[in-house]
Amino acid sequence: MPFRGFNRGTIVELFVESPIKCPIAPLKFGLMLDDYLRDRGVRSSVDIVLLYPPTDHLHAQPEVNKLGRILLEERGVKYIFNFSVSEIRPEEKVVVSDKGERIKYDLLITIPPHRGAKAIRDSGIGDPYGFVPCDRYTLQYRKGKTKYDEVYVIGDATALEVAKAASVAHYQSDVVVENLVHDITGEGLQIRYRGGETICPMLTDLYTQHGRGGRAWLPWWDYKVNEMPFMTTRFGWWFIRAFYLSLPLTMRGG
Ligand SMILES: Cc1cc2nc3c(=O)[nH]c(=O)nc-3n(C[C@H](O)[C@H](O)[C@H](O)COP(=O)(O)OP(=O)(O)OC[C@H]3O[C@@H](n4cnc5c(N)ncnc54)[C@H](O)[C@@H]3O)c2cc1C
């Protein structure tokens, strides 16, 4: 059934395992789906259930988690933590956990486990997931005792404990590019990665006719600093639109 024709039943969003790209996405998808269905006037006949993998939070950033929980509860979007999926039975339209819990669905949206490139997994240079270990401040390759100073790792490919987000790759690119240039000119490592800078857009309301209008914010954090308490706002929505529209103009080297 095409999604636009979905007017009644249960939509289950299944987040199987971390890490995933843009880890705020399962939460904001749940909120935007709620808004979309309200705008179409069918929300009261549709249940939304978000299934999270073994974890007790919606997001590792405490303020994102806090606001997310408030908004999901206000809007009647159900979320279940620590759901380790063991089986999907399409003929019964049921997702089954390893503890035997059964969640019925009419429409299932899955975020499958993410893995690095097969070539990395096969070569042994990465971790078992195919992500590549590196120093968390210099981004140079490090795996146990193996070190390659002339090899830098960037973006989703890293095994660092940072979000797999374009903003992360963007901040890392400065470090990698400058240090490669310094390597070539013989000056050696000059720039250290401050560490973990991440901006991840939190969209909670769509720009619809009948809702509260688009609402968003751009939470920011790094290795040492957590995001401050925040709300999504109309201003945030327009700010994000302006940011994305102007991004190609502001990208370094673009
Ligand atoms: C639905 C969704 C929404 C997202 N929203 C946001 C967001 O709002 N904000 C944000 O910051 N991030 C967001 N992200 C995450 C963001 O897209 C990624 O983190 C980012 O693209 C990572 O950049 P990267 O250069 O490390 O990897 P990629 O963008 O994946 O680039 C890797 C490139 O390498 C190429 N490649 C792979 N294997 C080979 C090979 N063997 N030889 C040659 N080339 C190869 C691939 O084709 C690809 O072009 C989102 C992701 C998804 C899926």
Image: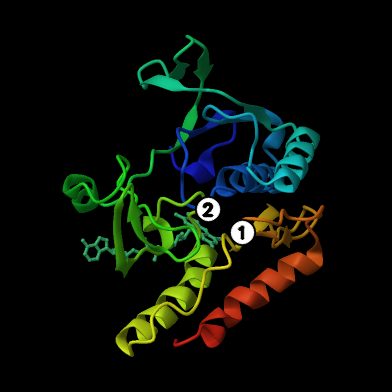
Label 1 beta carbon within 8 A of ligand 1: yes
Q: Quadrant of ligand 1?
A: bottom left
Quadrant assignment, res 128: top left
Give the residue displayed 72% in from the left and 66% down from the top: 237
Q: Which residue sits furthest top?
A: 100
Q: Is residue 17 above or below residue 167?
A: above
Query: What SS does tag 2 mark?
Result: loop
Quadrant holding the N terminus: top left
Residue 196 pos. (x, y %): 57, 59
Occupied quadrant, residue 200: bottom right
Labelled pair 1, 2 in contact (Cβ < 8 Å)? yes
- Which of the pair 9/108 is nearer the observer? 108
- Residue 39, how many percent across, how many down? 70, 48
Q: Is residue 235 above or below residue 161?
A: below
Q: Amino acid at mark 2?
A: Ala
Query: Badge 1 local density, few (<14 within 10 Å), some, or many (20+)?
Result: many
Mark 2 and ligand 1: say if the CB distance to the nearest ligand atom is below 8 Å. yes
The residues bearing labels 1 and 2 have C-alpha atoms spaced at a distance of: 9 Å
Q: Which residue is mark 1?
A: 200
In this rendering, does residue 42 appear at all? Answer: yes
Q: Position of residue 115 (x, y in %)?
A: 33, 45
Q: Look at the image and tell me whether residue 205 can be seen.
A: no
> Dividing the image into 4 quarters, which one contains the C terminus?
bottom left
Vertical relation: 14 (above or below) 227: above
Name the residue that disc number 2 marks. 163
- Horizontal and vertical percent position of residue 79: 64, 29
Work out which residue is located at the far bottom of the displayed protein and give it.
185
Packing grade of label 2 (10 A; few <14, some 14-19, many >=20) is many
Is label 1 in a helix, a strand or a loop? loop
User: Is 20 on the left or on the right of 45, as rendered?
Assistant: left
